[in-house]
Amino acid sequence: MGALRHAVLPLCVLAHLAAIAVFAIHGKEAMADTLEWPRATAALTPIERHLLGAGLVFHVLLAVNDVAAIWVENAHYRGMATLLEFILYAGDLADAVYENGLLEGSGGREFTLIPLAAMTALTLSGLVVHSHEPGVFTKDKNSKKSQ
């Protein structure tokens, strides 16, 4: 059993599918509200709409990549897919902390901080475990069997 294949990447797929569902069902305005984007008016500007649309494309792209990494029998591909997830979540978390002042007690913004921190920790722990494979959760399929 591989940690990336059976735990980390499926959870990432679920996170992406949840974001895609919010976009598909409720639209970009609902996603901006969900993310607690500070904005001057209730209506999104064209650049905000474009950035949210690009965010939707990132979720679709990474969900497809994660499903392929789960399906394909290649541990290196799974490691790279998890690294992409880590970069996304860690970068988004760093930006959220910097831009929104989440760690300065701005109140009520933990909704954004907690999921990003959890996914960053999940993907980082998956990469750490993956770096010690085979041996932690898997056995080397290519090793010669003693006779």
Image (cartoon, grey):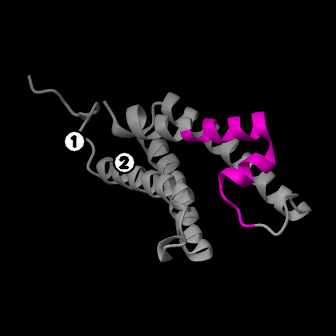
Name the side, left or right, on which 27 lies relative to 109.
right
Q: Residue at x 45, y 58 (%)?
A: 117
Vertical relation: 121 (above or below) 81: below
Question: Percent from the top left, x then y, of residue 31?
Answer: 72, 49
The numbered mark at residue 126 is 2
Q: Amino acid at mark 2?
A: Gly
Vertical relation: 16 (above or below) 131: above
Between disc 2 and disc 1, the foreground one is 2
Q: Residue at x 75, y 46 (%)?
A: 30
Q: Residue at x 84, y 59 (%)?
A: 42
Name the side, left or right, on which 10 lies relative to 64.
left
Vertical relation: 101 (above or below) 124: below
Name the side, left or right, on which 91 lies relative to 31.
left
Q: Nearer the viewer, residue 55 or 42?
A: 42
- Element class at badge 1: loop
Q: Main secondary structure of the magenta part?
A: helix
The extreme left residue here reads 147
Q: Residues within 10 Å of mark 1 (few under 14, many from 20)?
A: few
What residue would you read off at disc 1? 136
The extreme front residue here reads 107
Span highlighted in magenta in the image: 15-38
Q: Quarter of the image for the N terminus: give it.
A: top left
Q: Nearer the viewer, residue 114 or 19?
A: 114
Name the side, left or right, on which 122 lies relative to 19.
left
- Is 24 in the magenta? yes
Question: Percent from the top left, x then y, of residue 147?
Answer: 8, 22
- Element class at badge 2: helix
- Is 12 in the magenta? no
Q: Nearer the viewer, residue 51 or 42?
A: 42
Q: Amino acid at mark 1?
A: Val
